[in-house]
Image (tube, rainbow, N blue to C red):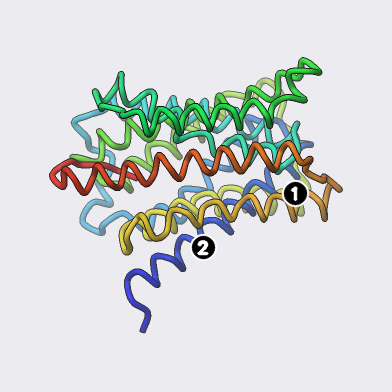
């Protein structure tokens, strides 16, 4: 029998693998409109999330006393998802994944204004190091005026707002409800893009689009279980394995070879994120009564 920490590591590894597969599938779906991909991500993402709902909540699972906070979380998540989908289609996989690691930097900054958290010089130094990494990775975008390089950063801002919203919501709302509202929102948003022109998928592509939803929903489920079963400090660093998968997939499928600048920038961003993460764990131990959602 595996211990809780060992199960947590296993679930985090599965989460990284399925998120990486979802990124791969999204990049493969370039022949289909973004709105159509959003619909499949949301609608079929409901399937794994459905199993999280307690049986006694199946009839009234949608009841909440905090609808506007859920709406804010859903809109921020929608912006982040659209940004990352377009970025995955237009930029090399390793660059998108590397820039997406900057989310903790934005979480640190926004938490000052939205959560009234105090940020010490240690985390400010980490933020500075992280943004140097972002500039190093994005240099080709600055030189060529490639605005697609901004999309992973928009994703980071959106995910920072999502994280802060979940921190607030999770004090009273179950994770499955937060997740279901989001998947329903992106499904509806995707449906509204039908007049813009959807493409009838072939059977093979239909399976691909369905898998985008199933892998996305499953990855979130694995991630939630990992944090639930084990110490966050033990499993969170495993998330950075996704960069290795991105480099491998990018090279084997699209012949993308990350530049030395991309790798150096990614190292700086990851290093900064780990500093921020360790300081948050330290402060959490200092104030064990504080409620946080990682």
Q: Position of residue 242 (x, y in %)?
A: 60, 52
Q: Position of residue 184 (x, y in %)?
A: 44, 37
**The image quarter in which residue 115 lies:** top left
Residue name at image x 62 percent, y 52 percent? 20
Residue 37: give its label.
Answer: none
Q: Quadrant of the N terminus?
A: bottom left
Residue 13: give its label.
Answer: 2
For marks 1 and 2 on the same chain, the one whose residue lies earlier in the sequence: 2
Q: Residues within 10 Å of mark 1 (few under 14, many from 20)?
A: some
Residue name at image x 64 percent, y 50 percent? 243
Q: Where 233 falls versus 74 (above or below)?
A: below
Q: Position of residue 271 (x, y in %)?
A: 52, 43
Q: Secondary structure at mark 1?
A: helix
Residue 205: give its label.
Answer: 1
Outermost residue toward the bottom in this view = 1
In the displayed structure image, the side of residue 288 where residue 279 appears, left or right: right
> Between residues 262 and 58, which one lies in front from this camera angle?
262
> Between residues 82 and 107, which one lies in front from this camera angle?
107
Residue name at image x 65 percent, y 36 percent? 265
**The image quarter in which residue 191 lies:** top right
């Amino acid at each position: 029998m595996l211990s809780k920490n060992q199960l947590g590591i296993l679930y985090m590894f599965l989460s990284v693998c399925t998120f990486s597969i979802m990124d791969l599938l999204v990049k493969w779906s370039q022949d289909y409109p973004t709105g159509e991909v959003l619909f499949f991500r949301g609608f079929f993402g409901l399937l794994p999330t459905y199993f999280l709902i307690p049986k006694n909540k199946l009839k009234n699972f949608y009841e909440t006393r905090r609808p506007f906070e859920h709406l804010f979380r859903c809109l921020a998540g929608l912006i982040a998802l659209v940004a990352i989908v377009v970025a995955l289609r237009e930029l090399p996989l390793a660059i998108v994944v590397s820039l997406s690691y900057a989310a903790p930097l934005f979480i640190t900054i926004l938490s000052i204004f939205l959560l009234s958290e105090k940020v010490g010089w240690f985390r400010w130094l980490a933020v500075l190091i992280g943004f140097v990494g972002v500039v190093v990775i994005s240099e080709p975008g600055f030189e060529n005026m490639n605005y697609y390089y901004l999309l992973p950063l928009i994703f980071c801002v959106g995910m920072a707002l999502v994280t802060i919203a979940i921190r607030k919501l999770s004090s009273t709302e179950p994770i499955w409800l937060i997740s279901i509202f989001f998947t329903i929102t992106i499904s509806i948003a995707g449906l509204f893009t039908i007049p813009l022109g959807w493409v009838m998928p072939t059977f093979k592509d239909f399976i691909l689009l369905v898998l985008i939803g199933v892998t996305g929903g499953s990855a979130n489920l694995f991630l939630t279980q990992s944090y639930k079963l084990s110490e966050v400090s033990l499993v969170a660093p495993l998330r950075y394995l996704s960069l290795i998968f991105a480099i491998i997939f990018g090279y084997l499928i699209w012949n993308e070879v990350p530049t030395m600048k991309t790798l150096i920038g990614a190292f700086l961003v990851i290093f900064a994120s780990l500093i921020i993460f360790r300081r948050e764990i330290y402060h959490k131990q200092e104030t064990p009564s504080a409620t946080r959602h990682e």
